[in-house]
């Protein structure tokens, strides 16, 4: 077929191909380049972060534990995520079930209402919740942040579980029922294992979004408690050493561990959406 | 998969015509399932209504009582005072630029991720998306400042390679350029996610047909692949624009106070200037713009592509 094409067309094909390759590598470099850089610099021994480091040491990793803010902030973030994740998972799963089993409740209008926390800009959610918590007299910052995180994460659970339920074959329910299974048995022994990938993806979204949230948290957090992202931000505002690089490297290590878990449980390609 | 086989006693009463089919319970039990999340949604909407109420309240300095009455002065100020119009304009401009670049970089990435025959290439590309996606945004933005900063990788490289002298600085942070790069970096994983999902659903037989009729790769791409993936592109563009336009951490860290996008202006008004009604009005404007964009996306996709 190539013979029927003019030189202009072939030139165009080569140019198009090169442009695509160029952009692709640009994207790859932008996505992972900074992450590799931060890991490298975290092992620098200089007083101030310098590129390239003039000496290497683990002093900034030691400094994480010498500083008062990072370890407590890590535990607060983990605690909030540990409350937020199961709560969002249960709320979202129940809602997804209601919408799936009762089409009246799963109409597009109601869906839009339940997905709205995903659509509303986080800064708007943050400020609105700040004012509303003040109005109703909720002064416990820890719980305000936790409720805020649940509000922004449970719609993701509804979505992932709904996707799993849409693929669920109702004949499985009928088969189990005709064999004498009670409704709760059908639910726990059949439905839950089948929709497990949706539950897992939802829980993962809830956990990472809660653990990483900065925008909603910064409105709701007081001066007494800090989550890890807020502590990192405040430290880098006032310091130019490589402690934040060391914290970053540890958090990247954490996301690699998380990734391995995803790969084992549902497969990364499915999680990313490359495979159905 | 194992199916529970209950004992005969449990099985007996379930057999009979009066037993409703599974799942066909009363709507009331559905409402019961929905109730806990509905409660949160009601709370969320009440907060939004309260935000709106603040936005039409007269301004009173902290400590003074708010005068009763409704006013639209905050909206008028937001849309006429050059400082805030500028903030809205910068937000719009940078979000648009970031969306264009994220699509340019993201499309070839998503395309190869979905279409490659090599499992190793696919795994590599999946990892390049998954690692940033799962990594804390503040950490990622800090890492980017190490690349773009005045003593960062690019500046050091330019000096080392002799492109610049020791005293020169290539300013890539604290300006629109830095924030634009930061926004592209922030939205890129989301754009690749969305495009990959759309490309995966695409029917490749149409491309094969075009190729077998003599169209080359470029023509096939622009006449077949790209038009077919347009709903995905529109979805990715909308998501990218909305995420950029409401970005808070990215302009905060890469702009270092010199670039105020709308989210930063809202934050400053509420927590530092303490002009709560004005901050609320800006937030309502941001919300209305978001809803309009989502509505436009839905209309465009449905009208042109019937999806």
Image (spheres, coloured by chain):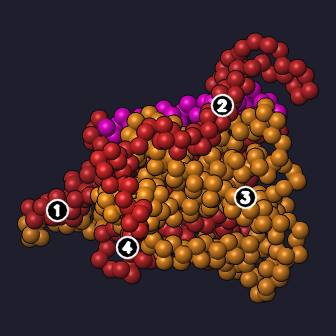
Which residue is the site of mark 1?
A: B205
Q: In this view, does B128 lie to the left or right of B65?
A: left
**The chain coloured orange in the image:** A
Give the labeled residue for mark 4: B1
Question: Badge 2 is on which residue?
Answer: B46
Q: Do the residues labelled 1 and 3 touch (CB within 8 Å)?
A: no
> Label 1 crowding class (10 Å Cα cut-off): few <14, some 14-19, many 20+?
few
Do tag 4 and tag 1 residues touch (Cβ < 8 Å)?
A: no
* Magenta stretch bounds: B274-302
Q: Which chain carries label 2?
A: B
- Relative to A181, is A126 on the left or the right? right
Residue at coordinates 47% horizontally, 49% vertically from top-left?
A: A96
Q: Residue B143: where, in percent of width, then height?
A: 66, 68
Q: Distance between the residues labelled 2 and 1?
A: 50 Å
Q: Dot 1: what SS? A: helix
Q: Which chain is red?
A: B
In this view of the protein, which residue sits in the foreground, B124 or B7?
B7
Mark 4 / mark 1, whichever is N-terminal: 4
**Magenta stretch, overall SS:** helix
Q: Which residue lies furthest to the right in this view?
A: B63
- Name the residue beneath numbered marker 3: A80
Lower position in the chain sequence, tag 2 or tag 4 = 4
């Amino acid at each position: 077929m190539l013979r029927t094409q003019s030189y202009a067309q072939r030139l165009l094909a080569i140019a198009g191909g090169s442009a695509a390759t160029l952009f692709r590598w640009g994207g790859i470099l932008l996505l992972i380049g900074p992450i590799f850089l931060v890991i490298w610099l975290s092992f620098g021994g200089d007083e101030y972060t310098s590129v390239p480091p003039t000496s290497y040491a683990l002093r900034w990793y030691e400094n994480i534990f010498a500083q008062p803010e990072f370890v407590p902030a890590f535990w607060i973030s983990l605690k909030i995520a540990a409350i937020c994740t199961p709560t969002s998972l249960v709320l979202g799963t129940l809602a997804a079930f209601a919408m799936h089993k009762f089409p009246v409740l799963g109409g597009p209008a109601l869906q839009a209402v339940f997905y709205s926390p995903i659509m509303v800009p986080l800064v708007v959610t943050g400020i609105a919740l700040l004012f509303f918590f003040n109005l109703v007299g909720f002064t416990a910052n820890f719980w305000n942040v936790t409720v805020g995180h649940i509000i922004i994460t449970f719609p993701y659970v509804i979505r992932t579980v709904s996707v799993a339920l849409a693929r669920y074959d109702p004949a499985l329910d009928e088969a189990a029922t005709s064999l004498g299974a009670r409704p709760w048995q059908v639910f726990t022994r059949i439905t839950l294992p089948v929709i497990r990938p949706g539950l897992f993806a939802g829980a993962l979204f809830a956990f990472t979004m809660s653990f990483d949230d900065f925008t909603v948290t910064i409105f709701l957090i007081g001066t007494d408690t800090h989550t890890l992202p807020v502590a990192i931000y405040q430290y880098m505002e006032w310091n130019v050493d490589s402690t934040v690089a060391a914290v970053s490297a540890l958090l990247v290590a954490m996301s690699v561990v998380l990734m391995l878990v995803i790969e084992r449980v549902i497969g990364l390609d499915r999680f990313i959406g490359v495979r159905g | 998969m194992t199916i529970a086989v209950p004992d005969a006693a449990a099985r007996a009463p379930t057999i009979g015509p009066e037993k409703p089919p599974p799942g066909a319970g009363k709507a009331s039990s559905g409402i019961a399932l929905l109730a806990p999340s509905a409660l949160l949604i009601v709370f969320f909407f009440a907060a939004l209504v309260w935000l709106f109420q603040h936005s039409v309240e007269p301004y009173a300095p902290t400590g003074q009582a708010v005068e009763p009455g409704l006013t639209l002065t905050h909206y008028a100020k937001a849309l006429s005072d050059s400082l805030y119009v500028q903030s809205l304009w910068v937000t719009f401009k940078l979000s648009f630029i970031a969306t264009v670049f994220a699509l340019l970089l993201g499309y070839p990435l998503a395309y190869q991720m979905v279409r490659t025959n090599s499992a190793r290439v696919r795994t590599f590309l999946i990892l390049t998306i998954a690692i940033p996606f799962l990594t804390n945004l503040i950490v990622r933005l800090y890492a980017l400042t190490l690349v773009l900063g005045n003593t960062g990788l690019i500046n050091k490289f330019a000096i080392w390679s002799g492109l610049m002298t020791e005293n020169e600085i290539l300013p890539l942070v604290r300006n629109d350029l830095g924030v634009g790069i930061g926004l592209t970096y922030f939205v890129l994983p989301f754009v690749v996610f969305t495009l990959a999902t759309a490309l995966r659903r695409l029917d490749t037989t149409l491309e094969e047909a075009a190729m077998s009729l003599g169209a080359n790769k470029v023509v096939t791409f622009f006449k077949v692949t790209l038009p077919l993936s347009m709903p995905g592109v529109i979805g990715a563009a909308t998501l990218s624009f909305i995420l950029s336009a409401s970005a808070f951490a990215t302009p905060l860290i890469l702009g270092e106070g010199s670039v105020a996008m709308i989210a930063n202006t809202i934050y400053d008004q509420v927590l530092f200037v303490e002009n709560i009604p004005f901050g609320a009005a800006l937030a309502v404007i941001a919300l209305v713009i978001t809803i309009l964009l989502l509505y436009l996306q839905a209309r465009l996709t449905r009208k042109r592509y019937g999806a």
